[in-house]
Amino acid sequence: MKTFIPKVETLHKKWFLLDLNGMTLGHAAVAAANVLRGKNKAIFTPHLDTGDYLIAINATKLKLSGSKEGEKKYYNFSGYPGGLKVTPYRRMMQTKPEQVFERAVMGMLPKNRLGRKMFKKLHVYPGEAHPHQAQKPEPLK
């Protein structure tokens, strides 16, 4: 018996809509990463991009459990001495709420070319509106 390897050219990629309203950051990120990788499909192959597209709306309404809201920090390092920038979670949610979710999902994808390709299929918006009505996204459960 031969191992089945799906042909990437013949795969039909769907569009899903994930409403982040009231969801916990980690739970939402896991659901998003599974859709982007294709782990929800029977033809999942770790070395191929079998995942679907994902639209995440209401990024401003994400929540964290416990006391993480006051303690969580995001780090950016330029590579130069003294180039470390630390941003608290609250300020990040006020300025760039979509980046909070994107960073959580990016940390759950493979750290290689394939992971970067999968990440490009994620579209995050801070509010209800998104420009992808033409793709007819299905709501993600």
Image: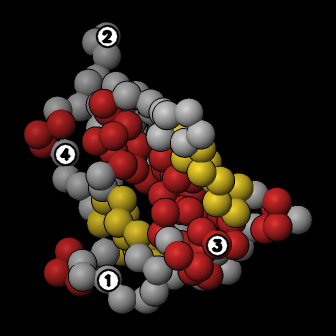
Of mark 1 and mark 4, the one earlier in the sequence is 4
Q: Residue at the spot x=30%, y=30% of the render?
A: 113
Q: Residue furthest bottom?
A: 128
Q: Which residue is mark 2?
A: 1
CA gap between label 1 and label 2 equals 46 Å
Crowd around label 3: few <14 · some 14–19 · many ≥20 (10 Å): few
Crowd around label 1: few <14 · some 14–19 · many ≥20 (10 Å): few
Quarter occupied by residue 70: bottom right
The image quadrant where one finds the N terminus is top left
CA gap between label 2 and label 3 equals 56 Å
Q: Which residue is mark 1?
A: 130
Task: Give SS at disc 4.
Answer: loop
Mark 1, mark 3: which one is toward the viewer?
3
- Image mark count: 4
CA gap between label 1 and label 4 equals 25 Å
Of mark 4 and mark 2, the one earlier in the sequence is 2
Q: Which residue is mark 4?
A: 11
CA gap between label 1 and label 3 equals 24 Å
Kindly identify the amino acid type of the residue bearing the numbered disc 3: Arg
Q: Which residue is mark 3?
A: 91
